Structure formats: C-alpha cells, structure tokens
Image (cartoon, rainbow, N blue to C red):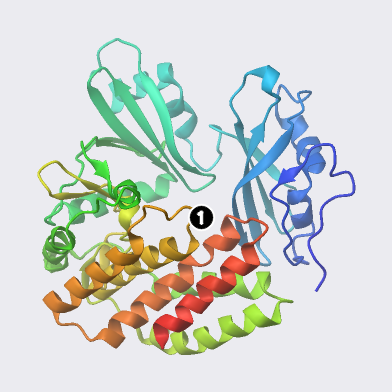
Amino acid sequence: MTDLLQGSAFADVPVVPRVEFPVDPALPDLAKLFDGNWVWQASRSQFADADRIPCQFRVRQFSHTPGRSATISYFADWAPEEFQSPDILSCRIEAGTPPAFSRYPRDQFLPGLEQAAYPDSALSLLNEHVFAFPRRKLRVNMIRYRPGNRAVLRHRSGKIGLYVRLMRPSRVEGLLKAAEIIGHSGFAVPRTVGYWRQGGAVWLSEIPGRNVRRLMRRAKPPDPDAILDGLESLWSASRHAEGRAFDLRGAYRRAKRTFRHALGKYDDVRQVCENVSSTLDPFVRTWQPSTIAHNDLYDDQMLLLPDGRVAIVDFEEAGPGDPMLDIGNFLAHLKWAAHDSSSAKKDVSAPYYHRLRDAALDRLKWNQSDLDMREAVCLFRITTNAIRRPDQNWRHRTLKGLSLVANTLN
C-alpha cells in the first residue's frame, strides 16, 4: 500500500515528527495533514494573522476513523524573536467535505470553550452559572484539550479554584449523571457547583491533593487498598446504575479499525494484531455490564489526599460496567507506562502493577485468567496511543504494545 508521504514543498514549514501512514482513498487530503506548507496555506483564509509563518508544526494528537474522518492538532511554534507561546491549531477532514481548521480556543463543537478560556468572559460565565465571584482578576489555565471532543480549564480567583469541563452540549446530562453515580462511592469527589447546558460547560470544585501519576514517577504511589476501598463501595452502588452503560464493543471495534488501516503493509505487526484479536473477539462479543463501575480507571484520574484517601477527578464514563474491567484498565495503563515510558528512572509503574494486581486478586478472589482477559482488551485499546500520538517509532511502539497484549493472554 502506498505510504502517506510528505508534500514536495515540505522544507519551508516542517511538520514534526515526520511519520508514515497508509493512504485512505476516502480521504484524499489525509496526506496533506503532514505537509506543513499545505497546513499553513490552507488555514490562512480562516485566521486574521494569516501572513505570519510558523517555524514548524508539532503534532499533538492524531485521530483517524478510516474511510470517514480524521482530526489532527498541532502546536504552531513561532520564531524565538517573536516571544510568543505556541498556538494550538486543529484540522478536521471528512469524506466529501473541505478541510475545516480551528485555533484554540475557537472550536465549533465546544461552544462554551472560547468564553471560558478568556478571563473577562469566564468571569461573566461564573457569575451567571455558578455564583457571584469577587470582582478581581481571574486566572485561566488550560489543562487538557482534545479538539472537537473535550477540554478542561482551571479558573482561579484568589483562594477560590474551580475546574470547568467543556464538552458537546449533548453530553452535559451524561456528565451530571456520572457525577451523581460517583458521589455514592467511597472516593473523595469534586462537587458540581454549576453548569451551562447550551455552552457544554460544567464547573467542579477543586480538590487539594497530589496527582497519582506524578506520585508514580516520584516512587510515592498510594496504598492499593485505598483504591480498592473506594472501588468496592462504587461497585456495590447498583441502585444508582441508571447511567449510560460502557460500550466495550464500540471501543474495541474502533481500535481494530485503527490498527487494520495503519498496519496495512506491515505484515509482522499486522499478524500479531490478528492473533491477539482472534482471542479477544469472543470475549468482547459476549461481555455484558454486571454492576456500576468507573469504566476508565487509571492513575491520571486520581489524586492522593493528605489523609491518605483517594479522590477521583475524572469520572464521565461512570455507569453500568464491570469491576474487573476497572482493575484491568488500571493494570493495562501501568504496564503500558512501564514499557513505553522514555524516562522510567524513578517510575514505579512496574512494581506497583504487581502490588495492585496481587491486592485485588487476594481481596476479591477473582479468577486470574478472567482478569488477564480484561487487562489484555484494555491494553489493546491503549496501544492505539502509538498511532494517535505518533512519532518516528510508532510502528515499533505498536508492535511492543501488541506483544504485551499477547503476553498477557498467555
């Protein structure tokens, strides 16, 4: 299959890293997303300062649904003498439509993001949808941003700190329901202090604590029992299971489509993918939710509080699910971090993996093979990170991830 190659005029405005993916006949502009000159020229008509030329575009995220659409976001880096922070530029292509560009914080799918991202308009939103804020300068920090999907910002005024989650308006009700569900767990959770349905914005209270992923890197993770205590109380809250059920089949199918397209000509990696999916397919087909669960549990979703309790700060997938899948997902993230990290000098992901797994099996008396199957299907999905956040070694990283899946199943 023909490679996705860089444009012939690439030298002027490079896209880094340089990567190769197979072409998608339904998306003829896909190759151009990695041609820096095309990106700049095609986006010029949509931005007022179009005559300014960045020195490079750095790929942040790449999401591709073969045959349907692709979204890519870049950091647009400017020359040092301009003393300007990188801009975030995004491009979405869909079959049969021209490319659509956006620049943070303007996002047609997140209608409240632009107002929430600037201090003056954000203060007005807070006064209207949360509570009367003191008339002082508001600080706004962008924490996360996935174009067309979601964003998390921090709003701070003096000692008052809130996080605002921006999403498509149709998802607000789901987040509010998930917040209600997670509130019945033993975890510390942020309070919902306000929301703006039309703008797709939900404000949550700030919880003082230390991010568990950062603690992993400092070799100071929480006691696994603190996590299991909170999870057991969540899993037992079956009376609150009216939320949206976790769609494991859909998530798994999306991962398979991603691999099948990206690995089209790489027989070695594709064969490993086919081998593991032949084992995972029957499990996914028969899997059913059993009780309430978090459905996306891993270290970056949690904080460790000064009193030793664990807080959950990201919970939008909470609803009917599978307790073993919660632990399997956490284990899969730990295994991926231990093998994919470029700086694992102090990271304790590998030893903590065994601590958490042993603690869960000992406490909950689960069948080890059942837990391994769930860890493997979660790791299969996580391995798509090598493609969604590409670098020159994406194929090697994909092979390593799929090999870890195979080892987990053996």
Quarter of the image for the C terminus: give it.
bottom left
**Is residue 342 something one can see in this rendering?**
yes
As drawn, is 6 to the left or to the right of 16?
right
Q: Quadrant of the N terminus?
A: bottom right
Q: Secondary structure at mark 1?
A: loop
Count of numbered tags: 1
Quadrant position of residue 40: top right
Q: Nearer the viewer, residue 176 or 377?
A: 377
Q: Position of residue 19 (x, y in %)?
A: 72, 57
Q: Is residue 374 left or right of residue 21?
A: left
- Up-down: is 26 above or below 399? above
Residue under the image location 47 percent in, 69 percent down: 381
- Examine the image and state in which quarter residue 338 appears: bottom left
> Which residue is identified by label 1?
342
Q: Does residue 307 appear left or right of residue 298 in this picture?
A: left
Foreground of the two, 291 or 349 = 349
Residue at x-position 31% and y-position 35%: 163
Q: Position of residue 340 (x, y in %)?
A: 49, 62
Amino acid type at circle 1 is: Ser
